[in-house]
Image (cartoon, grey):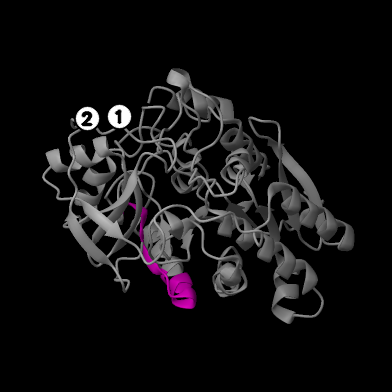
Amino acid sequence: MLTRRLARHRTATLIAGIAGIALLAPLAVTADATEATHGQAQDSSGSETVIVPGADTPAERTRVARTGADVLHMDRNGLVVHATDRQVAGLRARGFTPQRHQPLSAAAPPPVDDAYHTYDEMTAVLSDTAEDHPDITELTSVGTSYEGRDLPLITISDTPAQDSAEPAEPEVLFTCTMHAREHLTTEMCLRIVTRFTSEYGTDPEVTELVDERTIHVLPMVNPDGAEYDVSGERYKGWRKSRMPHYWGAVGTDLNRNWAYNWGCCSGSSGYPRSNTYRGPEPFSDPETRVVAEFVESRVVDGQQRIAAHIDFHSYGELVLWPFGFTEADTPDGMTEEEYQRFVDVGTAMADTNAYEPMQSSDFYITDGTVNDWMWGEHEILSFTLEMYPSGGGIDGFYPPGSVIAEETARNDAAVDLLLREAG
């Protein structure tokens, strides 16, 4: 099924203020403006954080994103992006007035924080959990990354290895760290794993959810990129995978590489050096391909058993739902009733964690995303949760380890709510 869909498609932050923002003089830029997809630096070097005043509508934010600038978040002063000199020139050519952004802390990525789990530490946690809770867990792998790392999947259920359980339990999938620099999301997935295993049998709600649902957790979709991002004394600000492309470019934005409306709507880049490079074709990268194959494998007797999904990202404190490729609420592929369910569930989750709920395209247009594919191909109730903080520069991707416990627990109620909705 996945092969047929791939062939078919080949042709084909919270809007609120943060204190302490200071706007300095407009940037002096001499580089020539370029087309939207030509000019994104491969990492944080050679670019800087700027704020774009006036980009306060989805259409204007989409125009900014199409310069290739790396959109970080929205605050009361404008859209905060990480941009090269060439991209800043492109913004000026489009009538914007980008200015240097003075974040609350250093603009450069901070030193690597040992409080966060590396890939090896993450896999060790999963192995120990499966060993300690053999009756309710099954540890497998959905496949391997470009550099050969397993993408471990842990399944939590009172019958974790019984596909033939009748009646079938609704299944819910949680994915994390599709973007390499978003390490807080790995911690989010590990919290889900730890909470639903260690509290099983003692916490009544946890016990009920494990007994009545099948919970799948993929804590690190992009292990190559995540490991590269921490392979030094300081974080690199790396977003993409590590698959090489032509022109010496490395990496694909895995959240622009999904087959549903891939590359349709100027919501991704065709330029390999862009931070939103969609890849040469849908599912060109093994990481997205093996996760999609796993989702396809959950179609049993003609029915997709995965009912709901959250893809955790950072940052911005947002709850987002499909579609991202169009500003329309109900294009082909979604009815009014289905859209309203996304609004209701997304708003209810946001009520639990104080995030801002919105349709993905209300921030800016994106295409080839996991949420659009999950719903468009499988009618899975799929959300993105953009985690802490609500704002910042490039360092916003790297909050101190001291916030891990609080900011992951902040989403416990949202996770439980979606698990109940899956029924």
* Residue under numbered circle 2: 34
Which residues fall within the magenta stretch? 347-361
Q: Position of residue 47 (x, y in %)?
A: 34, 42
* Residue under numbered circle 1: 38
**Label 1 vs label 2: CA separation?**
6 Å
- Give the structural element (helix, strand or loop) at label 2: loop
Q: Judge left or right: residue 115 versus residue 108.
A: right
Residue in view at x 47 percent, y 38 percent: 253
Q: Judge left or right: residue 92 versus residue 377.
A: left
Residue in view at x 63 percent, y 30 percent: 146
In this rendering, the answer to whether 20 lies above or below 171 is below
Q: Judge left or right: residue 296 versus residue 249.
A: right
In this rendering, the answer to whether 369 lies above or below 214 is above
In this rendering, the answer to whether 350 lies above or below 253 is below
Would you say the magenta stretch is mainly helix, strand or loop?
helix
User: Which image quadrant: the N terminus?
Assistant: top right
Q: Residue furthest left?
A: 95
Residue in view at x 43 percent, y 19 percent: 247
User: Is residue 56 shown to the viewer in this render?
Assistant: no
Q: Determine whether label 1 and label 2 are within 8 Å by CB.
A: yes
Q: Residues within 10 Å of mark 1 (few under 14, many from 20)?
A: many
Return the residue nearer the eye: 24 or 401.
24
Magenta region includes residue 172: no
Q: Position of residue 40 (x, y in %)?
A: 35, 35
Q: Position of residue 415 (x, y in %)?
A: 58, 67
Return the residue nearer the eye: 405 or 168.
405
Q: Position of residue 210 (x, y in %)?
A: 74, 67
Residue in view at x 29 percent, y 36 percent: 266
- Give the structural element (helix, strand or loop) at label 1: loop
